[in-house]
Image: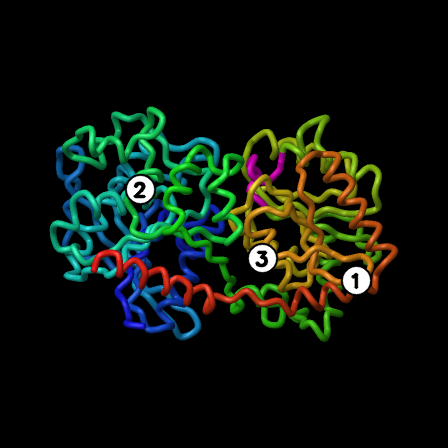
Amino acid sequence: MEKKKILMITSEAVPYAKTGGLADVVSALALELARKGHDVRLLLPRYYRIDRSKLECHPQPLSVWMNGKEEWTGVYETVLEDGGASCPVYFLDHEFYFGRDGIYGHRMDEGFSDNAARYALLCRGTFQLCRMLHWIPDVFHCHDWAAAPVCYLLQKEEKYREFGRSISVLTIHNLGYQGKFGLDEARYIQQEMDSYHLSTLEFEGDLNYLKAGIMSAHKLTTVSPTYAQEIQGEEQGFRLNGLLHYRREDLTGILNGIDYNIWNPAKDKYLGDNTFTPDNIRPKAKLKGHVQKTMGLPVDSKVPLVGIITRLVDQKGIQEMFSPGKGAMFNICRDMDVQFAILGSGDAWCEEEISRLSEKLPNLGVYIGYNNELAHNIEAGCDFFLMPSRYEPCGLNQIYSLAYGTLPIVRATGGLADTVENYDQKKGEGTGFTFYDLYPEVLYNVMKWVVETWYERRPHIRKMRKRAMERHFSWPMAAEEYEMVYEEGVKKIY
């Protein structure tokens, strides 16, 4: 395949800014494509917490025309490197729009009131940056709603200028987040509004950034084959299912990989001397004791330990697990000989509820916030990992769990269905436990099934662990599929 110039536009990328799996995926994919010989570069905002002293400042500011006036942004640069691969990373610096704590808002459930303008600046600045660099991408690869207007701008304005042979690819990491704003804020994206342009930007009376991207992108991808099908239906289509079904020929589901240089029990730097392999998992018992002690749980190797690392938002099944008086967690901890280690943050009511439950339940350990070292130890030291997601485009934690022999317990949706093989209790085969309906009583019964399997069928657990650790979800395979999407997109303009 002919090597391409690819610009990834994103609101997050590790190690610079992260709220979820989007940040991991963007950086890993960029590096894998660079490894394959493509000229890959990243662009994201320079948020307050990204230290300018560690970046190289371009001497000239960037002029971005938006909302009838000139906005001036600084441009910073660094290099993302891993495993012999590298790619430049550019940051748009604008103190008013990006010089604040938080990425989308001060809390996950409270977005900044000017997000339409903030990410319009990123998208309009994309083309100005390319002009400044004298570098015209073959592919603008846009990630989620915050970058989706790039696809619209390319089609409506920029293809008539230097970018006539560039294509756009929009990857939908989570359809539930669409970038909805008041229609009057379309002025940040479109300089001269008319009914033709408005029909692309508007959806059900709102400005909708993701919808504009879906209509405008040359090719669409999402992060698992099952999710690509689910979002074309009413249940998980978030009212865009009709449009996605209309564009189904241009929609491809590509399963995320994981970075085995980082998430690998054989060489994980956070495990100290307790690294392990499928043929020698004895150190996992020491890690279990470490997690139990860290989370304030009784240290007991005989009791099954279940990990949860999550954003505490409705998508993740938190109502069914933790809703006061109705959620399954209290009854599970009260009735079953099992322990939980929870690491997460999100909706205030849920943070408060699980903290309150942890004070009542000696078998429930909670850490509010995020701690990367603890996350690695929970993945490595737990026996099971629970993901009762309402929907899950791909999910990464269940793949991490498989790599560490920590058997996932998942709702069979999206990427969870594509990656976890359900336990067959007759043959002792499978790589985890799956279920379909999401109700508190279902979660209770699934956990009862898991706990009984732990105590009564330990040979099956050992067999499943080895099978899980031998599964492989790598980025090279995913990158090849993205290359095919790029090729198909290029054919659309020639």
The dot on residue 215 is 2
Above or below 491: residue 365: above
Residue 175 picture quarter: top left
Instruction: Classify the position of the C terminus by image quarter.
Output: bottom left
> What residue do we see at 33% from left, 52% from top?
219
Magenta span contains residue 254: no
In the displayed structure, does residue 236 sit left or right of residue 143? right
Residue 344 picture quarter: top right
Q: Is residue 304 visible?
A: yes
Q: Amino acid at mark 2?
A: Met
Above or below 212: residue 488: below
Q: Position of residue 110 (x, y in %)?
A: 44, 31
109 vs 209, nearest the viewer? 209
First-in-chain label (3 vs 1): 3
Magenta residues, start to end? 310-318
> What residue do we see at 26% from left, 47% from top?
93
In the displayed structure, does residue 457 sit left or right of residue 122? right
**Mark 2 neighbour class, 10 Å CA radius: few under 14, some 14 to 19, many 20 or more:** many
Q: Is residue 98 visible?
A: no
Q: How is the image coloured?
A: rainbow
Q: Which residue is mark 1?
A: 428
Q: Which residue is mark 3?
A: 373
